[in-house]
Amino acid sequence: MAATGTEQLKRVLKPVHLWAIGVGLVISGEYFGWNLGWAVAGTIGLLIATVVVTIMYVTFVFSYTELTAAIPHAGGAFAYAYRAMGPFGGFIAGYATLIDFLLATPAIAISLGSYLHFLYPVIPVMQSALLFNTAFILLNIWGVKESAVFSVFITILAVAELLLYMGIVSPHFKMANYLASPMPFGWAGVFAALPFAVWFYLAIEGVAMVVEEVKEPKKNIPKGYISAIVTLVFLAFGVMVLTGGITDWHKLSGLDYPLPASIGIVLGDKNALTKLFAGIGLFGLIASLHGIILASSRQVFAMARSGYLPRGLGTVSHRFKTPHWAIMASGAVSFVAIYCGTTDQIIVLSVLGAVTMYMMSMVSLFILRKKEPDLERPFISPFYPIFPATALVISLICMVAIMYFNVMVSLLFLGILALFIAIFVLMGKHKVKISGEALMEA
């Protein structure tokens, strides 16, 4: 049974939960996906792309935190863009965020299935992906406090495993391996690798989706965001560089399970530690799958509550105090994508949504600084306007590069956006002002 108007999301989350959700959302990006960038750029090409993307994310997170702390709304970029630019701005930012999170979920589920298949070849990838997806839909319906506690536990295990991985492979690192064919496609490869570099950090913005469930949000949100990005930068560069130097990187550039494959090269496929590591490696993927289902469902919930999606998706369960219909709807989209897409296509589509959302958020920050100068801002973006401008420009470069190298996927992204805009206008939603609980005035 769902309550309709009186049920509220519970404020139970602390900084450690936000750190765990932030790192957990992203940490699967260290386990798979990024290595596909080697296939289009080589080791140094991907390294350069990752340095550029890291600068984008550091400047973005510090700027985005200003918005999140000032406007603690489960809609995240959707709420900020609506407040800054009105219905069309909010709709485009909301659509982009939905694509970001809803498409990241199936990519991670497929990789989870691939990891299990690596461990036990008799277990099929597709069925495993669907099973994991279902399990974490149910966990998220159960309750945010319970799922956040799980996030802390599983994220600590995932971080510890990556540190263990770096410790195991580092003695086998050889610079000659890392520098072999470093940029086979020149600078064009660097641009082609940008979406896979983004995968290292994609979804950290999902912390914004749970801000209505955070205790003392204006103090705790900055702590959660900043500690998460510091953790992720260290892990991203450590895993990427060390993995590239243990063997011929071409052998790893097309796999959905590069880390256990690397351990197998170092220790031998029959070594018990190889199987153990692959088993533990599931923790990182589980952490991200769980976190992104949490974040995507809150985005669906917020847009439905505001009337931009069917209002039934904006109800909160009376028993569990979670947006159960939004969680199930997000899961349904993931099931479809698991059946219909390949890992690289799903990653590129998700990244397109992400960089669009980043641009909309940074534009919103600039507009709100002028439009609402007196808005209470518990956290101020450092080095304004340099930080948000840097994040905006690099996001735009990423968008152009992704579209140039992935024409068909980009046309799909733009085609769906055009269809949704047409429906949005035909329904007259662009004329409806959102107010009160639906947009939670700060």
Image (tube, rainbow, N blue to C red):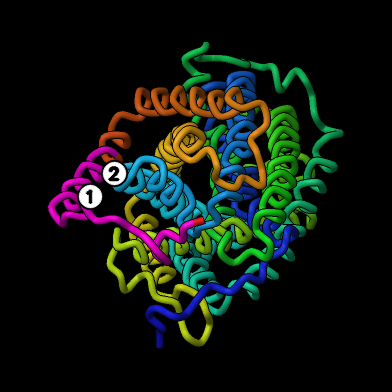
As measured in the structure, the alpha-carbon distance from the residue carrying label 1 to the one carrying label 2 is 6 Å
Q: Amino acid at mark 2?
A: Phe
Q: Which residues are magenta?
A: 414-441
Please state which of residues 238 and 123 is positioned toward the viewer in this rendering.
Answer: 238
Residue 387 is situated, as x and y percent measured from the top left of the image, at: 61, 27
Circle 1 residues within 10 Å: few <14, some 14–19, many ≥20:
some
Relative to 159, 36 lies left or right: left
| Above or below, 400 relative to 169 | above
Q: Name the secondary structure under disc 2.
A: helix
| Above or below, 360 relative to 245 | below
Residue in view at x 50 percent, y 75 percent: 8
Residue in view at x 48 percent, y 20 percent: 191
| Above or below, 25 relative to 62 | below
Residue beneath disc 1: 430
Residue 110 is situated, as x and y percent measured from the top left of the image, at: 48, 55
Q: Quadrant of the N terminus?
A: bottom left
Q: Report whether residue 27 is seen.
A: yes
Residue 84 is situated, as x and y percent measured from the top left of the image, at: 41, 41
Using the rendered view, name the quadrant where residue 333 is placed: bottom left
